[in-house]
Image (spheres, helix red, strand yellow):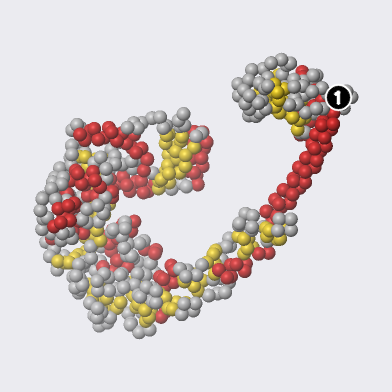
């Protein structure tokens, strides 16, 4: 039997709008973040309504999941479409011999893995579960099945060849093989775009922050740098340099490549890209001659932006390759320099000092740091830069020492205070029952259990002891009643799948009403016999299903289970094991009186 469930999905509303702007389509709700699954549609709807109030910046939806729906044999369906021509195969075949430019592959490796193989074959090998083929709406794009769920729904996603490679099989092929694949698909719609103003530099850099390939230490939001409210990359927008970037779909889509360029010199700096070789081709096609060298951008002018808090500091980005800038005090000109520059540009906090005196090398990361921006860790006997101190050290509020968090454990209490291991263990102990960390003064020794407990667990232990004492008292009472029954009756025994009925001794006193049960030895055995008071007896199964009132005679039972007799005077029942249940005594008395 299949169960229909109701699945909650959510996604940041602004991120959804950005996705639609970049991809010209809405993000499939199956790709939203998972927020839980429930069986009750009303409960799910109420939960989503509450979540919308708590998280107003997110979009929420409910997806009904019916396991019985959908095509469970979708893989066979997709393979059949590839074989019968419903889907057009991806075109292109690699040459038998290794082409020029594939320097990373030996002739033997190329021949074994790529020589003479079709791109369709390579795609099926890299992602066999995608069943990649040409899009039926645009043969310059690919279509594929993204997940089992979408396969069951017969939903294929359309995507550009470059996007498919970078998102789904980024490390399957060398860059040169990717280039040949793009060419086989009709080439790539590459449009070099350029950021020129300070605002454009910041916008493009920060857009790259979420990408591992095109993001860097300079692509974080402005608030992450000590130069805030000025972003470090605004220094580049002085006129000589521009930021060249390429998006996935021409002028839309995610950025998959960027680099600094010097249009006048026709050079470029370090490339950040999912396919650096393809971006080099695009740059050369646009007339750029060389790049990615230590001297590619040396001499380019930079904006001189002073720090508001220190007249000896200026805003400075991390400059690849040279790590230096040159400041001319006479002309006030700031330029990218070689290793002999008088300003260090290898810090990531967005600021640099004009003088080289009073500077240290961070003992953790090696960056140069001014003494006013350094921190001494006595526990390590090391000097650290601000970035390392704020991200990899902690200050103990107990002993007032600074520690390397990768070498010394630390804990934060509910009040937000941070302690090293020694100081924390002095202030907090572990409750031996719930294992919660509790202030030392709130831990008490519980003698009965021999444990150190928090106040809540201490109270629970006391309550359990009281319940156990009560259970023992009830057990003693039940034992006493059982001994009385033993003295006045003969225990029943089984013989040939039937129950012999002992007689009750004359003058046997009435006992409190009891909860009794009977377990047949074999399916079909008749229930026990009784002599009087049967008018008030009903038989139920262990799951509380009522089996009706008992009458003297035979019964047809087909399973061997426990059957329970409620509100039966013990002196009226024979052939049944009796157990004292005081909690039903009052109910039994009322039922008997009513009958």
Res. 180 visible in picture? no
**Where is 414 relative to 591, above or below?**
below
Q: How crowded is mark 1: few (under 14 residues within 10 Å), some or many (20 or more)?
A: few
Q: Identify the residue at horizontal 71%, vertical 19% (top origin).
A: 549
Q: Which residue is drawn at 75% across and 25% down?
A: 575
Image position, residue 3 (x, y; %): 47, 31
Residue occupied by mark 1: 505
Residue 553 in which image quadrant: top right
Rendered position, 442 above or below 301: above
Residue 84 drawn above or below residue 17: above
| Apparent side of residue 192 relative to residue 490 in the rendered image (left or right) | left
Instruction: Please name the residue shown 74% across and 58% down the image.
Output: 447
Q: Nearer the viewer, residue 41 or 590?
A: 590
Q: In which quarter of the image is residue 493?
A: top right
The x, y position of residue 315, in whole percent, is: 33, 72
Pick the front one: 398 or 14: 398
From the viewer's perspective, is 115 left or right of 16? left
Taking the view exactly as shown, the residue that stands out farthest to the right is 507
The answer to whether residue 446 is visible is: yes
Q: Quadrant of the C terminus?
A: top right
Identify the residue shown where x is 44% and y is 38%. Answer: 7
């Amino acid at each position: 039997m299949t169960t229909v469930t109701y699945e909650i999905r959510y996604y940041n509303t602004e991120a959804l709008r950005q996705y639609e702007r970049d991809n010209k389509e809405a993000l499939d709700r199956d790709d939203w973040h998972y927020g839980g699954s429930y069986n009750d549609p009303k409960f799910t709807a109420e939960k989503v309504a509450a979540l919308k109030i708590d998280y107003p910046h997110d979009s929420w939806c409910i997806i009904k999941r019916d396991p019985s729906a959908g095509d469970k044999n979708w893989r066979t369906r997709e393979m059949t479409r590839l074989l019968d021509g419903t889907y057009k195969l991806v075109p292109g075949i690699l040459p038998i011999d290794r082409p020029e430019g594939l320097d990373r592959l030996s002739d033997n490796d190329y021949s074994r893995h790529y020589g003479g193989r079709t791109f369709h074959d390579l795609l099926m090998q890299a992602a066999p579960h995608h069943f990649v083929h040409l899009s039926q709406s645009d043969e310059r794009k690919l279509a594929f099945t993204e997940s089992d769920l979408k396969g069951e729904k017969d939903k294929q996603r359309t995507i550009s060849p470059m996007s498919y490679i970078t998102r789904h099989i980024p490390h399957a092929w060398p860059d040169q093989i990717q280039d040949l694949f793009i060419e086989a698909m009709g080439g790539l719609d590459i449009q070099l775009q350029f950021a020129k103003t300070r605002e454009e530099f910041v916008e493009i850099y920060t857009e790259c922050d979420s990408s591992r390939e095109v993001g860097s230490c300079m692509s974080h939001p402005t608030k992450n740098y000590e130069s805030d409210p000025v972003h470090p990359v605004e220094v580049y927008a002085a006129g000589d340099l521009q930021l060249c970037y390429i998006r996935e779909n021409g002028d839309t889509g995610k950025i998959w490549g960027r680099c600094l360029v010097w249009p006048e010199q026709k050079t470029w700096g370090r490339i950040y890209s999912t396919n650096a070789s393809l971006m080099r081709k695009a740059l050369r096609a646009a007339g750029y001659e060389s790049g990615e060298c230590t001297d590619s951008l040396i001499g380019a002018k930079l904006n001189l932006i002073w720090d508001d808090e220190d007249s000896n500091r200026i805003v400075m980005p991390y400059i690849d390759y040279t790590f230096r800038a040159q400041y001319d005090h006479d002309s006030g000109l700031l330029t990218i320099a070689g290793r002999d520059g008088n300003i260090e540009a290898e810090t990531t906090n967005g600021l640099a000092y004009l003088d080289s005196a009073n500077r240290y090398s961070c003992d953790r990361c090696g960056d140069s740091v001014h003494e006013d921006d350094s921190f001494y860790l006595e526990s390590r006997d090391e000097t650290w830069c601000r970035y390392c101190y704020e991200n990899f050290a902690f200050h103990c509020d107990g002993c007032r020492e600074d520690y390397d968090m990768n070498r010394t454990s630390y804990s934060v209490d509910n009040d937000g205070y941070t302690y090293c291991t020694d100081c924390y263990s002095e202030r907090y102990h572990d409750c031996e029952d719930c294992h919660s960390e509790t202030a030392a003064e709130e831990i008490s020794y519980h003698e009965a259990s021999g444990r150190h407990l928090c106040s809540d667990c201490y109270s629970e232990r006391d309550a359990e002891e009281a319940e156990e004492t009560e259970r023992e008292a009830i057990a003693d009472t039940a034992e006493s009643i059982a001994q009385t029954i033993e003295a006045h009756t003969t225990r029943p025994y089984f013989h040939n799948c039937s129950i012999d009925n002992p007689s009750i001794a004359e003058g046997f006193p009435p006992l409190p009403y009891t909860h009794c049960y009977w377990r047949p030895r074999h399916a079909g055995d008749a229930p026990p016999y009784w002599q009087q008071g049967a008018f008030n007896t009903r038989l139920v199964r262990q799951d509380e299903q009522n089996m009706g009132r008992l009458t003297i005679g035979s019964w047809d039972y087909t399973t061997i289970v426990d059957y329970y007799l409620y509100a039966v005077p013990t002196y009226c029942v024979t052939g049944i094991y009796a157990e004292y249940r005081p909690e039903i005594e009052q109910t039994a008395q009322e039922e008997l009186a009513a009958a």
